[in-house]
Image: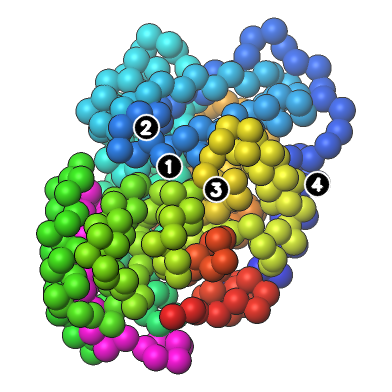
Amino acid sequence: MRSLKRVAAWAAIAAGSLGLMAAGPAPAQSSDPIRIGSTLALTGPLSATALVHKLVGDIYVDDLNSRGGLLGRKVEWLVKDDQSKPDVARTLYEQLVTSDKVDLLMGPYATGAILSAMGVAQRYNKMLIHHTFGIPSLAKYDKHFPAWSVGPKPEETVPTTLFDALAASPKPPKTMALVTSKFPSVHFMSLGAREVAKKRGIQEVLFLEWEFGNRDFGPIAARIKDANPDFVFVGNIGLEGNMLLEAMKKIDYVPPLHFHLYPAPGPMVAAPEGKNALSVTIFEEHPPYTDNPVAAKFVTEFNKRAKAAGFPYTKVEVQAAASFTAWQLLEAAVTATKSFDDAKLADWLKKNQVPTIQGVLRFDRGNNYGDDLMRIKQVQDGNWVTIWPKEVAAPGATLKM
């Protein structure tokens, strides 16, 4: 269900029954903390986005501890830098389980690292909640749970939502250039978008790929300009989209419409070239999302800390919301089961729906995925705002050309 009326009702229940981000006296804590281990891409090409996830985790853990922690035990979050490398993430998750002996795991950022972490979790029968895994068909472990609500077949449903938004515009595109990174989840989604566009009768005038880690986007920008499409679909992650837009600027080319799959949210919105950029979202900092009191409190705290940290974009958007949701799922499962046992937590999540700031999540469809709650947003007047579907769009917001 895309309507946020039901979400707001669920959120009110969550705030009251689970204590999520709620004020109140903290119960007495035992002397032994609960240790939660994870990695994040604190350095490397994914760091611009992973740092958002780090800030969100710090906010959530601080709030948890102010409310007495989990089941009255203080929470310690042990975070290691996987350097944006899946093989490093695999080694570090092994260390977290075997050497550091953490009680629970929280997933890293990006599909490759999450897949590595999932393999370790499966080896040791640990539950893994994660927030940005983009290829559901590869997530075959029965104790993994995605906070990124893309549904079991995002390669079909996500681009369908995008092209629905474009079809509702005053001038729907007839031609498309699709350029994409070979980063696994990005490439997977981009190939799905090709098929959806073809079924919609949109002519593909250019298809190009680049290796993840590429920094020379000049030739790609030139090919796009020569193709002269109505719409540019950019399968990017992190700062790749910014580098491509900068390369376009150097040759005096401005794409008429441009979509970026997984951009670094701050740098994209801050760049003049990012004007009118489109992307996917599950949450943006405006009504009706912020009508949820849990979300509103989180927004206030994130704004303050992001500004203090010098973030280029200090508002809550899709990355921050996905990370917050992951922590909500963990707290909900622990609170409901009154347990830290991985098997009990996983069993509860499979059988129950969880209200979160992005919507109500469930895990009873393919490979523990649930509904596709993805929406479309656009950079407008220096902010990301949801424009589609209409029932979750920012007040007065429509697609700008």
Q: Is residue 132 above or below residue 71?
A: below
Q: Amino acid at mark 3?
A: Tyr
* Snapshot quadrant of residue 163: bottom left
Residue at the spot of label 3? 313
User: What whole-number distance in Å separates the C-alpha atoms at marks 1 and 4?
Assistant: 31 Å
- 299 on left or right of 35: right
Give x and y (percent) for residue 274.
Answer: 42, 62
Q: Nearer the viewer, residue 173 or 94?
A: 173
Q: Secondary structure at mark 3?
A: loop
Give x and y (percent) for residue 288.
Answer: 69, 67
Q: Which residues are magenta?
A: 167-195
Q: Amino acid at mark 2?
A: Ala
Residue at the spot of label 4? 16
Give x and y (percent) for residue 126.
Answer: 41, 29
Residue at the spot of label 1? 49
Residue at image coords 37%, 32%: 41
Callout 1–callout 4 Cβ contact below 8 Å: no
- Give the class, few, some or many, for how many residues have Cα within 10 Å of label 1's Cα (few <14, many ≥20): many
User: What whole-number distance in Å separates the C-alpha atoms at marks 3 and 1?
Assistant: 11 Å
Residue at image coords 49%, 61%: 281
Residue at the spot of label 2? 41
Residue at image coords 50%, 38%: 53
Residue 81 visible in the snapshot:
yes
Q: Is residue 168 above or below residue 332?
A: below
User: What whole-number distance in Å separates the C-alpha atoms at marks 2 and 4?
Assistant: 34 Å
- Give the class, few, some or many, for how many residues have Cα within 10 Å of label 4's Cα (few <14, many ≥20): few
Query: Which one is earlier in the sequence, the residue at label 2 or at label 1?
Result: 2
- Give the class, few, some or many, for how many residues have Cα within 10 Å of label 3's Cα (few <14, many ≥20): many
Q: Nearer the viewer, residue 137 or 112?
A: 112
* Snapshot quadrant of residue 169: bottom left
User: What whole-number distance in Å separates the C-alpha atoms at marks 4 and 3?
Assistant: 31 Å
Give x and y (percent) for residue 389.
Answer: 53, 77
